[in-house]
Image (spheres, rainbow, N blue to C red):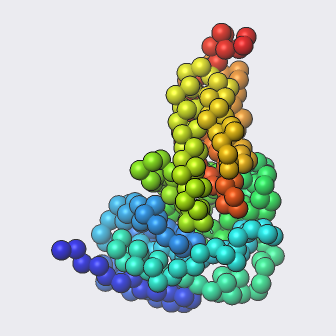
Amino acid sequence: MTTVTTPALAPTRAALRAEIAAVRAQRGGAGRVALVPTMGALHVGHAALMREARDRVGPDGVVVASVFVNPLQFGQGEDLDRYPRTLEADLAVCAEQGVDVVLAPAVEEVYPGGDPQVTVEPGPLATLLEGASRPGHFRGVLTVVAKLFGLVQPDVAVFGQKDFQQLTLVRRMVADLCLPVEVVGAETVREPDGLALSSRNRYLDPEQRRTAVVLSRALHAAREHATYGAGAAREAALAVVADTPGVELDYLVVTEADLADVDGTREDVREGRVLVAARLGATRLLDNLPITIHPTPPSEESR
Ligand code: PAF
């Protein structure tokens, strides 16, 4: 029988420091700290991040999960107000995964002076893809992630690859600002039909839920056609989603691994990424997969 221990709930900065110190002391005082930042509405994808965090720091380490719906990363007209807030259920998920401390602060605890005057400027990558339709989003994300790093002082932080642009930008922030944190990107967890798990999937009605599977199918189609070059891979993916009733495509792109445009002059075979975002009704879904980029064969170039 597995024992489920309730994690300590820390609503304030002071409680957080005290709880981390207490768990550390109980375990000999030398354990590393891992952070799993979340906005709550936890699902099995988050549970996988928590297991990854535990694997990284081991039984003597301290696993902290944060549950905070960060207003700074929501634009006007986005779903801040209706974003699901399910703290009781979230605590149960954290308990099952052996999380030691749950930081669940009020907005005033994170932003005591209201909107911060100093924020993290995420640079040019933040204007593309998600950033193109959500201006200011990544400024909000990186600012709160930097704050969480300051509050928790983790040795390791675990993020999902599902938000691949976010993961790339967090890595970039850590490198550019010399933050002493190891960033781990955990693989996306999927439903049996391939749909990437997301807190927003709960907004889908049954018809939209059935349709949503085209996103992961499109990504797989891109991978299957990648030997014909990045352009052919993208076309194959577009053919899967195009004209699917109820799916309004926002973007579908093949990129280099760091999200730069594919460099058509390169002749090597290398890792890249295929990413998609689409709206099903009022719900915007994202997904991505690694893809092997091949140079475009001459027969495809002349098509
Ligand atoms: O991915 C999320 O849930 C959020 O963007 C994060 C990283 C917790 C910051 O609010």
Query: Residue 15, how many percent across, how many down?
Result: 51, 90
Q: Is residue 51 left or right of residue 66?
A: left
Given residues 179 and 255, the one toward you in this image is 255
Specify the quadrant of the image occupied by residue 296.
top right
Q: Is residue 22 above or below residue 207?
A: below
Query: Residue 230, how many percent across, how many down?
Result: 64, 27
Query: Residue 204, how many percent across, how many down?
Result: 59, 62
Specify the quadrant of the image occupied by residue 301.
top right
Q: Is residue 274 left or right of residue 89?
A: right
Query: Residue 100, how many percent across, how many down?
Result: 39, 78
Q: Is residue 151 above or below residue 278?
A: below
Seen at 49% across and 70% down, the residue is: 42
Q: Is residue 200 above or below residue 102?
A: above
Seen at 41% across and 61% down, the residue is: 48
Seen at 65% across and 42% down, the residue is: 244
Q: Is residue 179 visible?
A: yes
| Quadrant of the drawing holding the N terminus | bottom left
| Quadrant of the drawing holding the C terminus | top right
Q: Is residue 177 visible?
A: no
Q: Quadrant of ligand 1?
A: bottom right
Seen at 61% across and 35% down, the residue is: 240
Number of numbered discs visible in the structure rendering:
0
Specify the quadrant of the image occupied by residue 137.
bottom right
Q: Is residue 178 left or right of residue 26?
A: right
